[in-house]
Amino acid sequence: MATLRQLEYLVAIVDEGSFTRAAERLNVTQPGLSHQFQALEREVGGPLVERLPRGVRLTPAGRSMLPHARAALAEAGRATVSARRAAGVATGELHLATLYSLSSGVLPTVLGLWRQQHPGVRIRLFEHRRGDEMARAMAAGQADVAVGPLPDDWEGTARHIGTEEFLVVTHADDPVAASDCSPSVRLPDLAEREWVHFTPDSGLCDILEQACVAAGFRPRVAVRTEQASAAIAYAAAGLGPTLVPANTIPLRFGGAFLRPDPPLRRHLAGYTRTSPDPVTASFLEILGDHAPLMPGHVDRRLRSTGRTVRRPPRDGR
């Protein structure tokens, strides 16, 4: 059976691109590294890397083994941290994976509350553009816990934290926001508009695109951006409507936002590869109890009768 040390050698060889640099990184002799690596190749029944004049290249067997090697090393490191936490040593790092929109919309409140309980634990954040990208990273052992849509085939621990709602954002004087006393809009009514869209590598791009296609049209693009916060600012400036999670809309927002009719929502969860240790479990508990999926200032404006637009006072207060 392959040892963790041998898997560490495989990862180092691939990352460094040579046996010599891998040995230097691990502070071992090159003959010793080569000997252990050859033993690993005998264990799996074939070569894992092809030695080239300038570097190395993974074989099909090596490509298959590498993500599992990374996951095993990451999990071994977390096992040590978990044991220390269980023994009452509340130090180290919480590794947290999430989506860009949730990083700005949901996590500041949750992490602020959690850090009050665990002031000695640092936070290392891994931000992803798409849910499927984050799920692959989690499967490879990137983080202790992920926050986002739960993958359909996830086999680890998961806690449902609530439902995220998407809203149409536009500028304060947009006729679609003032034409009806109801704080909602049918997406087909925006079919002829140019939209503040998202870059193709953003998961928000898929959400906006799919919502518009379901409404019977493909959105015309005025501008593309990667971040929800930028899309909100562009929409408020009059470049066109956009579609963003409600929790990303800032408190002092002078534009308009409306609920799509029918509503557009997605379920969110916190999920882990294995049973969470006490520190990670504490984070999941606070996440489930305090995640601001529908901020109060957004909910109040949606509930108010016909008050879908609130303009800042002229004196700036």
Image (cartoon, grey):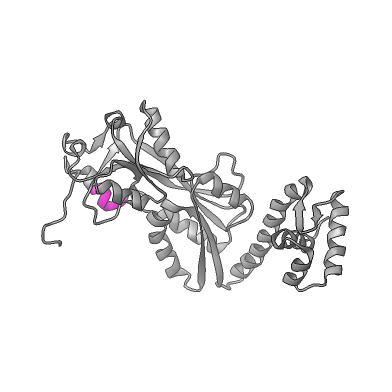
Q: Residue at x 62, y 53 (%)?
A: 274
Q: Nearer the viewer, residue 256 or 307?
A: 256
Q: Residue 66 vs residue 280: left or right?
A: right
**Quick one: which residue is furthest to the left in this view?**
314
Q: Does residue 158 lie above or below 35 as drawn?
A: above
Q: Is 204 left, or right, of 317 in this rendering?
A: right
Q: Residue at x 32, y 39 (%)?
A: 195
**Residue stretch in magenta:** 295-300
- Which of the 4 image quadrants contains residue 193? top left
Residue 104 is situated, as x and y percent measured from the top left of the image, at 39, 56
Using residue 121 as the reference point, say whether residue 156 is left or right of it: right
Residue for point 60% across, 57% down: 142
Residue 52 sits inside the magenta stretch = no
On the image, the x and y values in percent for residue 24 come to 75, 72
Instruction: Name the magenta segment's main secondary structure.
Output: helix
Quadrant occupied by the N terminus? bottom right
Foreground residue among 292 and 127 = 127
Residue 250 pos. (x, y %) = 29, 55
In the image, farthest residue toward the front? 53
* 215 or 199, nearer to the observer: 199
Q: In the picture, residue 278 is in which quadrant?
A: bottom right
Visible residue check, residue 83: yes
State the quadrant of the C terminus.
bottom left
**Location of residue 118 in the rendering, given as x and y in whole percent from the top left corner:** 48, 70
Q: Quadrant of residue 76?
A: bottom right
- Residue 290 visible, this angle: no
